[in-house]
């Protein structure tokens, strides 16, 4: 295990704690406080460490097969899981429709499946720049929504704009991965 992989593991543990904190909110309709602020802070920490571990892996020349597989897995758990955990909160019903979460999770499953098929055939299938922008938009949107349920309206505009930017980048980057893998998909 190298430093970037340890950071990825810490991100996974932080993600699980975010979910536990959100699940610990007894009444999603009631005003929220400490638990949701802790979830907000840990989510931001986890999102930031996603960029740190990748940077360190490249900078320290510590790119590993474990990191290539586990890092995107943890990203998907963080993002998809957070949006799923946010769905019961009434304060977000106007900002987080179910279909949005289905599109987001569906795209992540599709890209993961394509990446796995490509790499099983010995084809490199690295993340695209647009996919990285999508991750930033998803993180900003989920973070803003966590801030909203923590009890502040400061994040509403970030959540609204983030929703649309996330939706567009999710669909376009997913289509881009399908296009990139078209020969692989045609041969399947």
Image (tube, rainbow, N blue to C red):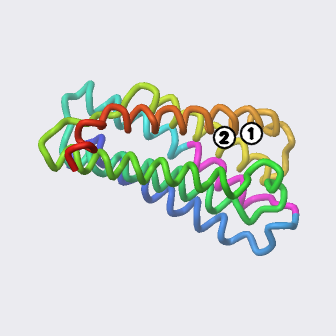
**Sequence-earlier tag: 1 or 2:** 2
Name the image quarter holding residue 97.
bottom right
Q: Which residue lies furthest to the bottom in this view?
A: 26
Numbered mark located on residue 159 in the image: 1
Find disc 2 in the rendering and name its residue.
Answer: 141
Give percent across and percent down for residue 170. Answer: 54, 38
Number of residue marks: 2
* Residue placed most toward the observer, 100 or 159: 100
Name the image quarter holding residue 28.
bottom right
The residue lying at 42 percent from left, 31 percent from top is 176
Q: In this view, does 89 lie above or below 156?
A: below
Give percent across and percent down for residue 128. Answer: 37, 29
Name the image quarter holding residue 2.
top left
Specify few, some or many for label 2: CA neighbours under 10 Å numbering under 14, 14-19, or 20 or more: many
Q: Label 1 vs label 2: CA separation?
A: 5 Å
- 97 sits to left or right of 83: right
Q: Are marks 1 and 2 in contact (CB under 8 Å)?
A: yes
Magenta extent: 31-44
- 31 sits to left or right of 126: right
Give percent across and percent down for residue 96. Answer: 73, 51
Instruction: Say whether residue 12 is magenta.
Output: no
The residue lying at 73 percent from left, 69 percent from top is 25
The residue lying at 69 percent from left, 58 percent from top is 98
Q: Is mark 1 on a helix, strand or loop?
A: helix
Q: Which residue lies furthest to the left in this view?
A: 122
Numbered mark located on residue 63 in the image: none
- 6 sits to left or right of 135: left
């Amino acid at each position: 295990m190298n430093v970037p992989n340890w950071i990825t593991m810490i991100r996974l543990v932080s993600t699980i704690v975010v979910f536990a904190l959100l699940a610990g909110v007894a009444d999603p309709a009631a005003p929220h406080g400490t638990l949701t602020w802790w979830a907000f802070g840990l989510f931001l920490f986890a999102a930031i460490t996603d960029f740190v571990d990748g940077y360190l892996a490249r900078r320290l020349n510590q790119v590993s097969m474990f990191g290539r597989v586990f890092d995107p897995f943890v990203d998907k758990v963080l993002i998809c899981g957070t949006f799923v955990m946010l769905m019961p909160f009434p304060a977000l019903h106007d900002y987080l429709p179910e279909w949005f979460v289905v599109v987001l999770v569906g795209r992540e499953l599709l890209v993961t499946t394509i990446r796995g098929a490509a790499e099983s055939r010995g084809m490199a299938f690295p993340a695209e720049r647009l996919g990285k922008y999508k991750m930033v938009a998803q993180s900003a949107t989920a973070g803003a929504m966590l801030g909203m349920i923590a009890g502040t309206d400061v994040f509403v505009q970030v959540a609204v704009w983030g929703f649309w930017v996330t939706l567009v980048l999710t669909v376009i980057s997913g289509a881009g991965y399908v296009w990139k893998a078209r020969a692989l998909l045609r041969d399947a």
